[in-house]
Amino acid sequence: MTPEELKYTAEHEWVRSGDADSVRVGITDYAQGQLGDIVFVQLPDVGAKVTAGEPCGELESTKSVSDLFAPLTGTVTAVNAELDSSPELINTDPYGEGWIFDVEPDDASEVEALLDAKGYEATIAE
């Protein structure tokens, strides 16, 4: 399932634009399925500057440790503190309760440059 209203990166992050200046970020259902049971999340710090395509945290699963990449350049405005005690939310609800962080993009046009659902589906089909 790839929600149509979201934007995506080739690194399997999704971005949801909200009413505010910041956007919400998480990993896709495909990514969480590939990782397996997520047991720990290293979140970026609120106020941290992140750079598109650069690691900004880590996801540890029963299979591996994987970098979490920033989908946009900007400033982290919030993190999902629920993931500290319940990292499995990423597995059970990757597009909802399993969101990871919010970022205020330096350039809002970066959001539109990301993949749409069809583009992302084509990426994971390769």
Image (cartoon, rainbow, N blue to C red):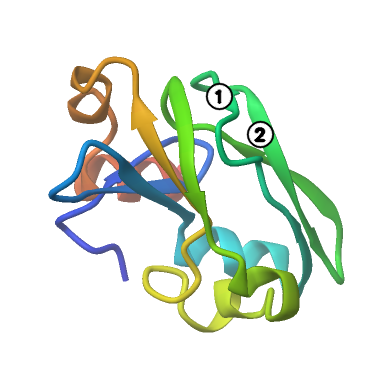
Q: In this view, does 101 lie above or below 22?
A: below
User: For this rendering, which residue is in front, 108 or 48?
Assistant: 48
For the residue labelled by badge 1, is the local secondary structure a helix, a strand or a loop? strand
22 on left or right of 112? right
Q: Report the residue at 68% width, 80% height from top.
A: 86
> Contact, CB < 8 Å: mark 1 with mark 2?
yes
In the displayed structure, would residue 113 be above or below residue 71? above
Q: Residue at label 2? A: 56
Identify the residue shown where x is 27% and y is 21%.
110
The x and y percentages for residue 6 are 23, 52
- Marks 1 and 2, the one that precedes in the sequence: 1
Q: Is mark 2 on a helix, strand or loop?
A: strand
Percent of width and height locating residue 123: 40, 40
Task: Establish if 14 lies above or below 81.
Answer: above
Q: Which mark is on residue 72?
A: none
Residue drawn 67% across and 30% down? 55
The amino acid pointed to by label 1 is Val
- Expressed as whole percent of the image width and height from the top left, the position of residue 106 reads 33, 16
Could you tell me how far apart the alpha carbons at marks 1 and 2 are, in whole angstroms? 6 Å
Quadrant of the image containing the N terminus: bottom left
Q: Within 10 angstroms of label 1, few (less than 14), some, or many (20 or more) residues? A: many
Single out the residue that lies furthest toward the front: 47
Q: Please tell me which residue is depicted at 57% across the width and 79% down the height of the picture.
A: 89
Left/right placement of residue 41 relative to residue 108 reads right
In the image, what residue type sits under mark 2? Cys
- Report crowding for label 2: few under 14, some 14 to 19, many 20 or more residues within 10 A (C-alpha): many
2 or 16, nearer to the observer: 16
Residue under numbered circle 1: 50
